[in-house]
Image (spheres, grey):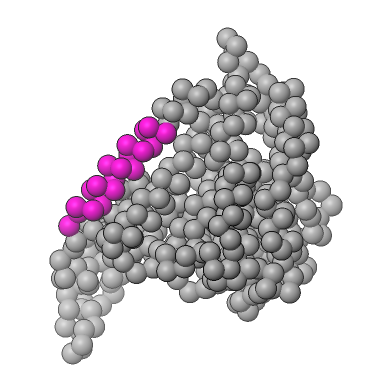
């Protein structure tokens, strides 16, 4: 395709061999089983206004390998289930899938601390799971039943839980909100920061640049993350943006380009960025990734790219397959462990899918339950004035 995609889909054999050699040179073993390995990230980071960047040689333990593989596989299975439920017309409305981009979320989450926060757009089923909501809470929310994390009242784009601020349907609107979360961290002095995620399609929104400016002036602990999956809604990034080096678009803000298909590279970049924003102020991070599905379920995803292109990325650059093969080569994970994880994840997601399909919706009266966390008025405003009693149940994950 265009220049951007060639960066994503091509991985020279020599680079992969160098990664393997570097990893094997740093393998620690116990009883002939590897417990830790030193790994070279797939591709070098690109820097903007930075003299030093993230570590390119990282350590990976067996426990971490098992955890990251399980998380990425679970997200993939959840999204596959969501796509099928949508085709069955059990999920209605908007539905944006994250398949192909799993390494971005899992890598960032691996670097986050308890005091850190994240806010994103509408492709957030995977993030909801990573931040503590089980698959049933995600799928139940998608099908609009009481087992959903917001009891079925939020749907695909409006999922929340502690330290996770959604799920935002307005393109780019979450970016200044993320700056606000970072301002709250600075005000509280708790040492936390906020990841404000947006896509390449939202990168041209004016409010994104306004947030950059305010965050820089106030030295806010915010990482502006552009998840560049190479396509917006129906067109390639190069047809929509005059500058597709999104990590440079913060002007005075420093930036990092990272291979978003490499979970360890994303983790390393995020660890560096967290330290930087807490000491210096905001930073822009571009994760170059790829989505397998269309922009949303109404987009077949093949009118502006070929099926062959999608298949090529799946074969050469799939984040889950690449990570699995690396871990097996290093002896951190065995094929039997991989099979066990796959079976466990499939069973959990299949059971959650069945429950989400057969769950019950809230009664109509619950349209006005938990409208406010702390309702200051005795009544809620209805069609004829303040005539509705506010009911607080606090049964959702976000309460």
**In the drawing, does residue 93 fall left or right of residue 194?**
left
**In the drawing, does residue 274 fall left or right of residue 145?**
right
Residue 391 vs residue 263, the one in the foreground: 263
Pinpoint residue 223: horizontal percent, then vertical percent.
63, 58
**Considering the image in quadrants, where does the N terminus appear?**
bottom right
The quarter of the displayed image where residue 12 is located: top right
Which residue occupies 38% across, 56% down?
A: 83
Residue 81 vertical position relative to residue 363 in the rendered view, above or below:
above
Residue 259 vertical position relative to residue 3 in the rendered view, above or below:
above
Q: Is residue 179 magenta?
A: no
Pinpoint residue 96: horizontal percent, then vertical percent.
45, 62
Which residue occupies 63% across, 15% down?
A: 29
Query: What secondary structure prevails in the magenta region?
Result: helix
**In the drawing, does residue 302 fall left or right of residue 55?**
left
Magenta range is 342-360
Pinpoint residue 346: horizontal percent, then vertical percent.
36, 38
The quarter of the displayed image where residue 65 is located: top right
Whether residue 67 can be seen here: yes
Pinpoint residue 119: horizontal percent, then vertical percent.
51, 61
Residue furthest to the bottom in view is 384
Q: Is residue 352 magenta?
A: yes
Which residue occupies 47% across, 29% down?
A: 338
Residue furthest to the right in view is 51
Residue furthest to the top in view is 31
Residue 113 vs residue 279, the one in the foreground: 113
Which residue occupies 39% across, 68% down?
A: 94
Residue 81 vs residue 368, the one in the foreground: 81
């Amino acid at each position: 395709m265009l220049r951007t995609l060639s960066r994503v889909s091509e991985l020279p054999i020599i680079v992969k061999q160098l990664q393997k050699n570097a990893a094997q040179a740093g393998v620690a073993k116990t009883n002939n089983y590897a417990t830790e390995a030193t790994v070279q990230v797939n591709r070098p980071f690109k820097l903007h206004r930075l003299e030093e960047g993230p570590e390119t040689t990282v350590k990976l333990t067996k426990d971490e390998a098992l955890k990251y593989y399980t998380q990425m596989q679970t997200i993939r299975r959840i999204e596959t289930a969501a796509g099928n439920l949508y085709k069955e017309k059990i999920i209605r409305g908007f539905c944006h899938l994250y398949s192909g981009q799993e390494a971005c979320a899992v890598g960032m989450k691996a670097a986050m601390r308890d005091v850190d926060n994240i806010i994103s757009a509408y492709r957030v089923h995977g993030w909801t799971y990573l931040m503590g909501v089980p698959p049933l809470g995600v799928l139940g929310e998608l099908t609009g039943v009481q087992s959903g994390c917001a009891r079925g009242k939020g749907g695909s784009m409006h999922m929340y839980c502690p330290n996770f601020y959604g799920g935002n349907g307005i393109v780019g609107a979450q970016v200044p909100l993320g700056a606000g979360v970072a301002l709250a961290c600075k005000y509280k002095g708790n040492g936390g920061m906020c990841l404000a995620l947006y896509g390449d399609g939202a990168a041209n929104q004016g409010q994104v640049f306004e947030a950059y400016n305010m965050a820089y002036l106030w030295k806010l602990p915010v990482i502006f993350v552009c998840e560049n999956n190479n396509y917006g809604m129906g067109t390639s990034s190069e047809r929509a943006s005059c500058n597709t080096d999104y990590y440079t678009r913060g002007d005075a803000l420093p930036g990092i380009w990272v291979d978003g298909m490499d979970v360890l590279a994303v983790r390393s970049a995020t660890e560096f960025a967290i330290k930087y924003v807490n000491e210096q102020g905001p930073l822009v991070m571009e994760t170059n990734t790829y989505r397998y599905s269309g922009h949303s379920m109404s987009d077949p995803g093949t009118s502006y790219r070929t099926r062959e292109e999608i298949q090529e990325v799946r074969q050469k650059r799939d984040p889950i397959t690449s990570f699995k093969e690396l871990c097996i080569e290093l002896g951190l994970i065995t094929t039997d462990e991989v099979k066990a994880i796959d079976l466990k994840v499939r069973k959990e997601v299949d059971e959650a899918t069945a429950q989400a399909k057969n769950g019950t919706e809230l009664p109509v009266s619950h349209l006005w339950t938990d409208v406010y966390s702390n309702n200051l008025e005795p009544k809620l405003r209805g069609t004829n004035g303040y005539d509705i009693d506010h009911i607080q149940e606090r049964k959702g994950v976000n309460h």
